[in-house]
Amino acid sequence: MRIVTIQTQVPDSVFLKLEQAPKEMRRGLKDAVNEMARQTEEDIRIDVYQRYALKSGRFKKGNVKLQKATVSKPTAKIKIKGNPISLKTGYRTRKNGIRKAGQAQVERAGGFEELKKSNGLKAFITTATQEDSDGNEHSYTNLFQRKGKERYPIKAFHGPGQAKLAEMVFRDMKEDKEDELRRRIFHLAERIMQ
């Protein structure tokens, strides 16, 4: 599980003023941080679907947990968890043909990429069965590729999971979000100092 954290970067003089301020003002800081966390959480979800070729419903709200800031601890955390997503079920794919290997598109801007090794081994879409610890067989369809010239073993392709996608999206928006939070905190501090 990856954790994206939003923290307040308040100068000591402003923080001392906030500690001496009435409780309503400290609640204002908590509210500003929580509002930024909610807005950032929504922006991450929107940007993930805009940037990546995820199929509908693969970045679920249930995988995102918001730990709110309190009056005594003005830090909010956005926790995003998720395992890698199989290419076939989570991203846009195209099946293999006689001359072309199976293709996948992870980023919307990138287009489809043919999945094949330098030695000519091509990816293909097939259904495989796997036995769990209880002895039950489960079948799943995915893009696979042989590891060598022999028929087996084969490996399944997976794309980045929800946590990794959110981390990459947040990396690009982090500076803007920190500036916006800093602006809100200074606006709150100016109201207190008057």
Image (cartoon, rainbow, N blue to C red):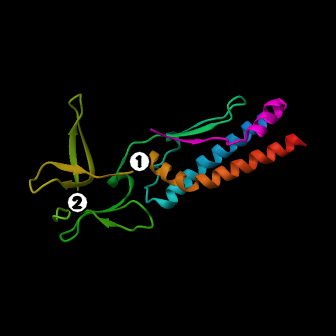
Quadrant for the N terminus in the image? top left
Side of 62 relative to 143 (left or right): right
Identity of the amino acid at label 2? Ala
Residue 73: percent from left, percent from top = 67, 31
Q: Choose top left, top right, bottom left or bottom right for residue 173.
A: bottom right
Q: Is residue 6 magenta?
A: yes
The outermost residue toward the left is 150
Q: Nearer the viewer, residue 16 or 112?
A: 16
Quadrant for the C terminus in the image? top right
Gap between marks 1 and 2 measured at Cα: 20 Å
Identity of the amino acid at label 1? Gly
- Classify 10 Å Cα crowding around label 1: few (below 14), some (14-19), many (20 and above): some
Report which residue position mark 2 lands on: 123
Instruction: Check disc 2 and report its element: helix, strand or loop.
Output: loop
Side of 42 relative to 14 (left or right): left
Residue 43: percent from left, percent from top = 59, 52
The count of marks equals 2
The outermost residue toward the bottom is 99
Q: Choose top left, top right, bottom left or bottom right for residue 95.
A: bottom left
Q: Which residues are magenta?
A: 1-25
Report which residue position mark 1 lands on: 161
